[in-house]
Amino acid sequence: MASETHYGEGGDVFERVQAMMKWTPQGQALGFEVTKLEGNHVWGRAPYKPELIGDPETGVIAGGVITTFLDQLCGMAAVLAMKEPSMVATIDIRIDYMRAATPPRDVLAEAHCYKIGRNVAFVRAVAFEDDAGNPIAHATATFMVNATRKFGANLREKKS
Amino acid sequence: MTPQGRLTAALARIPYATFLGVRAELKGDELTLVLPFAQHLVGNPLLPALHGGVVGALMELTAITQLAIASKSETFPKTIDVGFDYLRSGRPVDTYARAKVIKIGRRIANVQAEAWQGERGQPIAAMHGHFLVGDDEAANTKS
């Protein structure tokens, strides 16, 4: 695998990926950022925010925030692995928690799309504060590739 | 305080539940969490669709709350692992979730959950997970 990213032709890839991260209102609300790109690897940050606390006793961030962060970062890694970027849809994601995140530190993560086919992308990720050797959580996810649907598809009545 | 009142108060103490806008409804010992649609929950603004992580978060919150009720615990259990299956895109409408405690062991509980929108029979996502409900007294690790 070549070391350059495959995201489109020309332009500032990093800026475009950063914009993709903020393109989702939920990613924007949670303050997600992309911090580094390399091949089919992407690194990101989920900043600590008091309104995202899941355990008021300890101040530890909610598991749901980690789920959303890892899902989005894994999806990003899948898009980065494509020749022609397309929409992806999560098929499934499994998250194993090794320990609680340390408050009030930001959560960082690295996601790696290690295989992409015509239909499915396979991605792994790890969340940590300082280095992946002391993980908060590991994730394994699969994504449907080319999951592009019509603009406003979910606004139409009755679908299954 | 009624069980419903205690539950509402417990959720109100979790800032993230407030951030999502989650509301709890208790019928007997069966809990339904309701997530009213809000713009900031969107993951794909073109469709628009709820963020998968938000639907996952809703199911995990339902699972740990239902488990706290089932185990009569005052504190919320800790997540060991969770697996989320996405079945349908989450439309920009209210979402509901219910969880089923499969087994509560001495230390670990197994819980399943589902999220749906219009029809209960057409879930948009499913979750299964393991949660820590007790603690071993002595650590058995090398470092």
Image (tube, coloured by chain):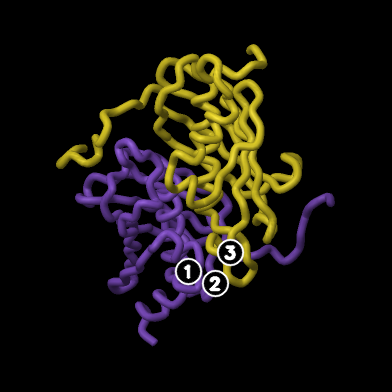
Residue B136 visible in the snapshot: yes
Where does the image place residue B64, in percent across and percent down from the top left? 47, 62
Do discs 3 and 2 share a chain? no
Q: How far apart are marks 3 and 2 (CA)?
A: 20 Å
- Residue that protrudes farthest toward the front in the picture: A11
- CB under 8 Å between discs 1 and 2: yes
Residue drawn at point x = 59 percent, y = 45 percent:
A96
Tell me the colour chain B is drawn in: purple
Q: Residue B75 carries which label?
A: 2
Which chain does the yellow colour mark? A
Residue drawn at point x = 51 percent, y = 26 percent:
A78
Do discs 1 and 2 share a chain? yes
Residue flagged by tag 2: what amino acid is it? Thr
Q: Please give the residue where the numbered disc 1 appears in the rendered image.
A: B68
Q: Pick whichever, B107 or A18, lies toward us.
A: A18
- Residue that protrudes farthest toward the left in the picture: A157
Q: Count residues near mark 3 (Cα–Cα under 10 Å), then give few for <14, some for 14-19, many for 20+.
A: some
Quadrant containing the N terminus of chain B in the rendered view: bottom left
Q: Please give the residue where the numbered disc 3 appears in the rendered image.
A: A50
Residue drawn at point x = 45 percent, y = 21 percent:
A85
